[in-house]
Image: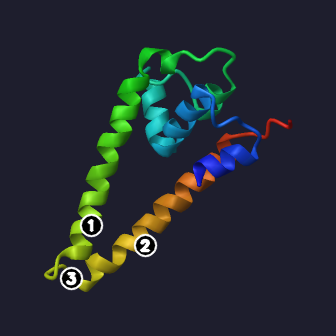
Amino acid sequence: MVAGIVHLRGYDLDEPRTRDAILASLLGEERVLKLIKSRDLPGTPMELAAAKVHDELAGHGDRQRGRLRADHPRRRQAAGHCRRSPGASWSAGSSVPATDAYVTWKVGRYVDREFLSRGR
C-alpha cells in the first residue's frame, strides 16, 4: 500500500532513497519523530525521498532496516498466536483483525500526508 501511494505520487521505486523512505514510513509517525529526535534518522520520509544524494540513511540504513524487521515479527507473532490458539478468548481473537486494520489505516494516512506529489 505504501509503495503504491508513493509510486502514484511520482517517485521512482527503483531509487534507494525512495525505498529507504518507504521503510521509514512503515515505522509510523510517532516512531519516525522519535528517531529523528534521537538523530538515528536524518529526516522525515519525505525528506529522505526528496534528497538530492542518497546517503544510506546517514550511515544508519542497515540499522533502520533491522529495526523494522525486528519489530514486524514480534507484532505478527502475537497476532498469529491469538488466531491459532484454541484457548484464546473470542475477544482477543477478534481484536487482531481490527488492530491490523487500524494500524494499516494509520500508516496509510501518515504516508498520504507525508509524501507530496512530484508532478512528473
Using a 10 Å C-alpha cutoff, classify the residue at mark 1 as few (fewer than 14 neighbours), some (14 to 19) or many (20 or more).
some
Q: Nearer the viewer, residue 71 or 28?
A: 71
Which marked residue is nearer to the observer: mark 2 or mark 1? Answer: 1
Measuring 85% from the left and 37% from the top, which residue is drawn there?
A: 119
**Which quadrant of the figure has residue 14?**
top right
How far apart in space, not on screen, are marks 2 and 1 (Cα)?
Answer: 14 Å
The answer to whether the residues at label 2 and label 1 have Cβ atoms under 8 Å apart is: no
How far apart in space, not on screen, are marks 2 and 3 (Cα)?
Answer: 15 Å
Q: Is residue 85 left or right of residue 96?
A: left
* Label 3 residue SS: loop
**What is the image's colouring?**
rainbow
* Label 2 residue SS: helix
Query: From what the image shows, is residue 60 above or below residue 19?
Result: above
Q: Give the mark nearest the N terminus, 2 or 1.
A: 1
Q: Which residue is mark 1?
A: 80
The answer to whether any part of residue 28 appears in the image is no
Q: Give the mark nearest the N terminus, 3 or 1.
A: 1
Q: Is residue 57 left or right of residue 95?
A: right
x and y, in percent, of residue 65 in the image: 40, 33
Measuring 64% from the left and 14% from the top, which residue is drawn there?
A: 53
Q: Which residue is mark 3?
A: 89
x and y, in percent, of residue 106 in the image: 54, 57
Q: Which residue is mark 2?
A: 98
Total count of labels: 3
Q: Quadrant of the N terminus?
A: bottom right
x and y, in percent, of residue 61 in the image: 44, 24
Q: Nearer the viewer, residue 30 or 74?
A: 74
Amino acid at circle 1: Gly
Amino acid at circle 2: Ala
Measuring 16% from the left and 82% from the top, which residue is drawn there?
A: 86
